[in-house]
Image: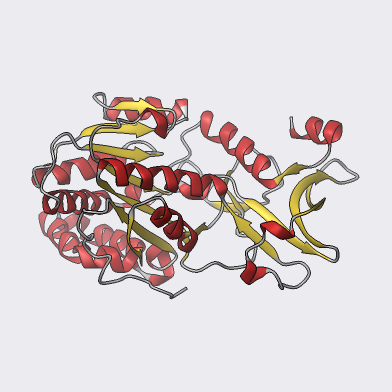
């Protein structure tokens, strides 16, 4: 499809390429687990989802335990995170309606098995508008399409996908000047520099933040990314737990890019929500008590102690997911701060 389109009409944008490739990829398979292409934190250990559930219950209680609150998960995978989070939240008295935003038929089928009482939505527009929302998005934003601008000898141009003489996909610079779209602090970058943005991610965060401002509630966005804007392409493809060429077999690998949390925090505040802070995943989980939880699980199942410790290390160690992965918290204007974020906020750290 891409080859025919490019041959007929010319190069396509990187965002177009990523969006269509991922739409095909996610529609047809369950990509998770050791037999899939990648493993996410909820599949590593129940501790991850449990601590999210406790965080949600805590902030809900301190907000006055409003009635009718909804648990909303964006891209809920197999439903594992929701299962663990809702079980833990119930211990804090939080028993919300469950709403999933999902576009993959294959993953929706798995979620229905685990959460038969949930309500599904293709996008955020169908979510309730008259009650507080508790939103969770784990490894959701990274799969949304990115736009790339590249500095050429003639100025900034959009980075496109074209065909070489052999019909293979290659990145090329477009012809339209794009200097006005480049943030001022990157304007003098040298030739070959790449600026990467995600209008799709900004749109999602803006809509969630606006809903929090109107309806009340809180949100957690958890993903790999950076805390300050940076130059360079972070676009990558993963298949069978290995990085592969982004431009080979689109639709057969998971295409992702790092999340610009600094920009998204600004977007959220401009939409009326409170930015609670952006923390490294390892520090945030430690502040919420993952060490104590791991100890309790190991005591209850001594034969699993080694595996439980290994899972906790994978979620929190700087060389694993602890530093690269970030947790960004948002809340309605009159809702309280989020546990852990105020103590391990990254501020201006990268």
* Residue 342, quarter of picture: bottom left
Indicate left or right for 18 with 275 as reference.
right
Q: Is residue 142 above or below residue 187?
A: above
Task: Tell me if residue 340 can be seen.
Answer: yes
Indicate left or right for 257 with 286 as reference.
right
Quarter of the image with the N terminus is top right
Q: Which percent across, then down, holds residue 156?
A: 76, 60
Closer-to-camera residue (145/1): 145
Task: Tell me if residue 251 can be seen.
Answer: no
* Residue 310, quarter of picture: bottom left
Q: Which percent across, then down, holds residue 307?
A: 27, 58
* Residue 80, quarter of picture: top left
The residue at 80%/42% (across/down) is: 11
Q: Residue furthest bottom?
A: 349
Q: Is residue 22 above or below residue 141?
A: above
The residue at 27%/40% (across/down) is: 215
Q: Is residue 126 above or below residue 17?
A: above
The residue at 33%/66% (across/down) is: 282
């Amino acid at each position: 499809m891409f080859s025919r389109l490019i041959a007929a009409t010319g190069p396509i944008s990187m965002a177009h390429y990523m969006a269509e490739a991922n739409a095909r990829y996610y529609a047809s398979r369950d990509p998770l687990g050791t037999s899939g292409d990648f493993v996410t934190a909820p599949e590593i250990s129940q501790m991850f989802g449990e601590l999210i559930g406790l965080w949600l219950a805590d902030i809900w209680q301190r907000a006055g335990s409003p009635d009718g609150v909804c648990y909303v998960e964006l891209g809920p995978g197999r439903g594992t995170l929701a299962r663990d989070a809702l079980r833990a939240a119930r211990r804090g008295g939080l028993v919300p309606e469950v709403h999933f935003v999902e576009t993959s038929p294959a993953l929706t089928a798995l979620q229905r098995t685990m959460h038969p009482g949930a309500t599904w939505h293709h996008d955020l527009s169908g979510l309730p508008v008259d009650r507080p929302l508790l939103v969770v998005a784990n490894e959701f934003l990274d799969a949304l399409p990115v736009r790339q601008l590249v500095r050429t000898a003639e100025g900034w141009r959009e980075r496109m996908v074209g065909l070489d003489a052999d019909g293979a996909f290659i990145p090329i610079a477009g012809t339209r000047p794009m200097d006005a779209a480049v943030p001022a602090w990157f304007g003098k970058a040298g030739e070959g520099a790449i600026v990467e943005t995600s209008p799709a991610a900004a749109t999602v965060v803006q809509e969630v933040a606006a809903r929090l401002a109107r309806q009340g509630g809180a949100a957690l966005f958890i993903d790999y990314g950076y805390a300050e804007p940076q130059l360079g392409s972070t676009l990558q493809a993963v298949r069978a737990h290995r990085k592969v060429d982004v431009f080979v077999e689109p639709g057969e690998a998971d295409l992702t890019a790092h999340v610009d949390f600094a920009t998204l925090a600004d977007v959220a505040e401009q939409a009326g929500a409170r930015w609670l802070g952006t923390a490294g995943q390892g520090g945030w989980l430690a502040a919420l008590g993952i060490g104590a939880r791991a100890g309790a699980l190991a005591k209850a199942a001594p034969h699993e102690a080694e595996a439980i410790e290994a899972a906790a290390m994978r979620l929190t160690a700087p060389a694993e997911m602890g530093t690269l992965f970030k947790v960004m918290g948002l809340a309605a204007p009159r809702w309280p701060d989020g546990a852990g974020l105020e103590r391990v906020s990254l501020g201006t750290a990268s």
